[in-house]
Image (cartoon, grey):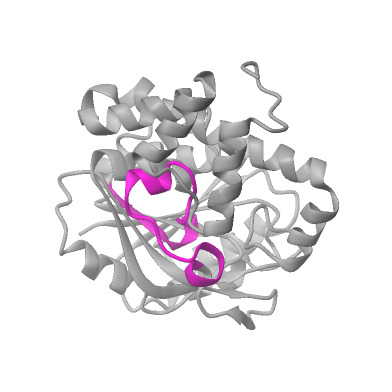
Amino acid sequence: MSVNILMSTYNGEKFVAEQIESIQKQTYTDWNLIIRDDGSKDGTCEIIENFINNDSRIKLIRAENVGVIKSFHELVINNNDADFYFFADQDDYWLPEKLTIMLEEAKKHDNTIPVMYYTDLKVTDKDLNVTSESMIRSQSDHANTSLVQELTENTVTGGASMINHELAKLWQTTNDIIMHDWYLAIVAAALGELVYIDQPTHLYRQHDSNVLGARTLAKRIRKWTHPNLWFEKYWWLITASQKQAQKLLTENLSALSETDKALVTDYVNILNQSKAERRQILDRYDLRKNKNYHTSIFRTLIITKFAYKGKNK
């Protein structure tokens, strides 16, 4: 069983050494760590080179800045010679049993079809002090495993995920992707299997330089004190998730079941329909968010189109 761990770095000198050390401490040791540096201007590459000098399993690719999604895409398509691929973020810290837990779970599933596996994670501050024992329970309420759930809200964190070779082969392009973890999750749910392992396998570090991160009180307060930004963000999430879903129809139409084809088509086109039809589509598939209050907002906005600025107002 061959394993590639794929890490994209960018100005990560503060935390990248701890992350690499945590990977080296894994109980499963037969892996390759392939790091694509996305044009760092600090000492990230020099830190990584020091590890390479003492560990032949680690490889560094110095590249130009293209952003996190394209960086991970390049890592996948240029290193697609493994059975399984783990995504690693430069600032997290993996618990020692992470690889073992996920690879043991993979043995229970059919990996001739596209599969994504993901776990829970513990949220920490910048010094790795745990602030939440379960990100899934505190932020998402429950983990998504079906397409209808994952279309509208993502519960997969890239650094807590693993994809098999069959899923890796299906990642064709990067346009209209909100984030690589979300996109690969909906592809897996639509064409194969999305598997959740109810166990935290790494520490998800929150700090000032996070590209994305867990929902915090400060973020919530900012949204509620600036309602115009709140509506803009919510509508962006709805319309961006529609574009992301459209990729299934564009790139994987023939592989979709008739049921999933209808689901995705209706979700993609829901804002083009009459108010009555929008309500019917929401009810037909029980389209919702993970938490009830977010579901109420999501459904209300789609039905009323309140503050919607799209072309089909």
The answer to which quarter of the image holds residue 145 is bottom left
**Compared with residue 234, is residue 130 higher up or lower down, i.e. above or below?**
below
In the image, what residue occupies the spot 70% across and 74% down? 126
Tell me if residue 147 is in the magenta stretch: yes
Left or right: 21, with 104 as reference point: right
Which residue of the protein is positioned furthest toward the front in this rendering?
Answer: 276
**Compared with residue 68, is residue 45 higher up or lower down, i.e. above or below?**
below
Left or right: 82, with 213 as reference point: left
Q: Magenta region: which residues?
A: 136-164
Q: Could you tell me which quadrant the N terminus lies in?
A: bottom left
Q: Could you tell me which quadrant the C terminus lies in?
A: top right
- x%, y% of residue 17? 60, 70
Res 26 seen here: yes
In the image, what residue occupies the spot 33% across and 68% down? 197
Tell me if residue 53 is in the magenta stretch: no
- x%, y% of residue 53? 51, 65
User: How many numbered marks, from 0 up?
Assistant: 0
